[in-house]
Image: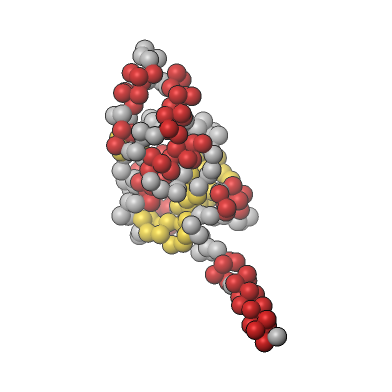
Amino acid sequence: MALFRLLAFLLVLFVVSPARAAGFEDWRDGDLVFQDSGGPQALAIRLATGSAYTHMGIVRLTAAGPVVIEAAARVGETPLARFLARGTDGRYAVYRVRGLTPDKARAVLAASRRYFGRPYDMFFRLEGDALYCSELPHHAFKAAGIALGRPERFGALAVDNAPVKALFAARWRQHPDCGATDAEGCWRLMQDQRLVTPAGIAADPQVEKLFSSF
């Protein structure tokens, strides 16, 4: 009986431990939140970058609670709880740009909000007319004078795998730069395309990881 009570006590500690239940609470304007969004595109991103981070956004504090500015179907705001619930198994990580002042954070948020309504960029280009998830903070922080995330060549990533090739096969005909070529030519052209990945932003020495449930 004593052993049973001990096991029950340990189980209660495991289930309701504040570290497990509370998650991250010290949210600030301009924080970066990462997740694994799931699905075929997320699998391709995981393999190409070697990271579990396949989607991200910028946190903005509001009177109703934190929201995440993200480039999803279109650039816009999502309540933080809804954003986190979309991630695989609810896992997420929080990073903060070192030394980000409130004034700089407001400038980042103002810059990101100027992109509201722009469509998702499924070709991961850096032009800004359409945006993908990690492109949004790259441009928004740049507008505030912070060069966040180093652009990498598409061909320098681990793109020679079946999920990436399947994503390419489904989309290449719509690529804005591939109208005058075939699939093979488009693939060659894309090798020099520059992009900024969630993993690249997380690895930027200017940011620090504050929390992770991965």
Colouring scheme, one of rainbow, by chain, secondary structure, one colour: secondary structure
| Count of residue discs | 0
Question: What is the quadrant of residue 8 in the picture?
Answer: bottom right
Left or right, 63 with respect to 102, comes to right
Rendering coords of residue 94 (x, y %): 46, 57
User: Outermost residue, right direction?
Assistant: 1
Question: What is the quadrant of residue 168 in the picture?
Answer: top left
User: Outermost residue, bottom direction?
Assistant: 2
Taking the spot 54% from the left edge, 34% from the top edge, the residue there is 74
Rendering coords of residue 203 (x, y %): 34, 51
Residue 163: in sight, yes or no? yes
Taking the spot 43% from the left edge, 43% from the top edge, the residue there is 46
Taking the spot 43% from the left edge, 32% from the top edge, the residue there is 162
Taking the spot 42% from the left edge, 56% from the top edge, the residue there is 95
Q: Quadrant of the N terminus?
A: bottom right
Q: Nearer the viewer, residue 42 or 23?
A: 42
Left or right, 17 with respect to 136, comes to right
User: Outermost residue, top direction?
Assistant: 180
Rendering coords of residue 122 (x, y %): 47, 30
Question: What is the quadrant of residue 103 in the picture?
Answer: bottom left
Residue 144: in sight, yes or no? no
Location of residue 209 with respect to 50 vertically, above or below: below
Location of residue 97 with respect to 54 vertically, above or below: below
Rendering coords of residue 73 (x, y %): 55, 34
